[in-house]
Image: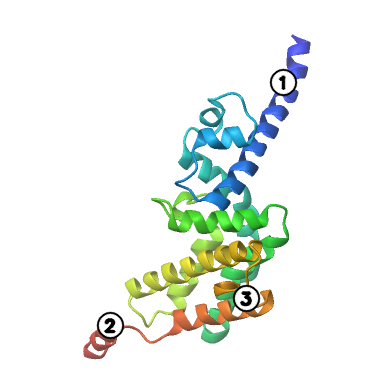
Amino acid sequence: MATSDASAPTRRSRGDAARDRLLDVAERVFAENGIDAVSLNSIARFANQLNGSVMQYHFRSKIGLIQAILERRMEVLNSRRNELIAHIDPSDRARALKQIAEAMVLPFAEHLSVEGGSAYLRFVAQVTFNSNKSVFEMARGRHDSAVRRIAELVREILSDMAPEIVRHRLAVVTNLVLFSIGEREKLRMAGRRSGVARLNTEEFIDDLVRMIVSALDAPGPLSNRAASTTG
């Protein structure tokens, strides 16, 4: 009995190591090839796993695998966003929107310096445009407190706009961040300085933050403004 108890942590650590290896491989393969083009079995082969059911054992499905990849990095990203938005004053509209834009961009940009960060950002871009669910739908309830707080702050700052317009703009700028950073990294890894990879990193981040602020704070649609005037 004592021998069995002593060996349990070893078995768990081996299982965790195998799971982490699968996540690393899946993140990279999804980033390079897209979501739809990659099967669970092909990921197992890339990871040199002979057990054909290993992916189902650890993740149950492709959606489960995608959620696991997202979740293991979300805690750090969420913590960094919470730091950036901790002292935002919604009454200072211009400054608050800039701080919110930075909180949306900087955690992802800073993640490039983390091991595997490049693959993760390219993976997130693939999920954004090649999945039936959005990144934040898949991560809902898992380290998403900062994202929810950002939405609350934007609604408060843009209280002069119709709620559906605010929700629309949040969705647009979120997709802008996820796609542009991931696409830029894909081009950079291919040695190309074109499209969203034309600018150096500092210029790219600064310009992206400015675009987000402008998108959030732009005048509302004509129909919305006309309704507000009539009201």
**Residue 184: numbered disc:** none
Q: Position of residue 22 (x, y in %)?
A: 62, 37
- Residue 110 or residue 142, whichever sits in front: 110
Left or right: where 110 falls relative to 154: right
The amino acid on which the numbered mark 3 sits, given as a three-letter code, is Ile
**Residue 8: numbered disc:** 1
Position of residue 229 relative to residue 173, above or below, is below
Left or right: where 227 falls relative to 76: left
Quarter that holds the C terminus: bottom left
Q: How packed is label 3: few (under 14 Cα within 10 Å), some, or many (20 or more)? A: some
The residue that appears at 35% across and 84% down in the rendered structure is 220
- Residue 66 or residue 231, whichever sits in front: 66
Q: Earlier in the sequence, mark 2 or mark 1?
A: 1
Q: How packed is label 2: few (under 14 Cα within 10 Å), some, or many (20 or more)? A: some
Measure the C-alpha gap from mark 1 to mark 3: 47 Å
Secondary structure of the residue carrying numbered label 1:
helix
> Nearer the observer, disc 1 or disc 3?
3
Question: Which residue is label 3 attached to?
Answer: 205
Is residue 144 among the parts visible in the rendering? no
Measure the C-alpha gap from mark 2 to mark 3: 31 Å
Left or right: where 1 falls relative to 140: right
Question: Which residue is label 2 attached to?
Answer: 224
Position of residue 227 relative to residue 80, above or below, is below
The residue that appears at 42% across and 85% down in the rendered structure is 218
Q: Quadrant of residue 76?
A: bottom right
Measure the C-alpha gap from mark 2 to mark 1: 62 Å
Q: Position of residue 99 (x, y in %)?
A: 59, 77
The amino acid on which the numbered mark 2 sits, given as a three-letter code, is Asn
Q: Earlier in the sequence, mark 1 or mark 3?
A: 1
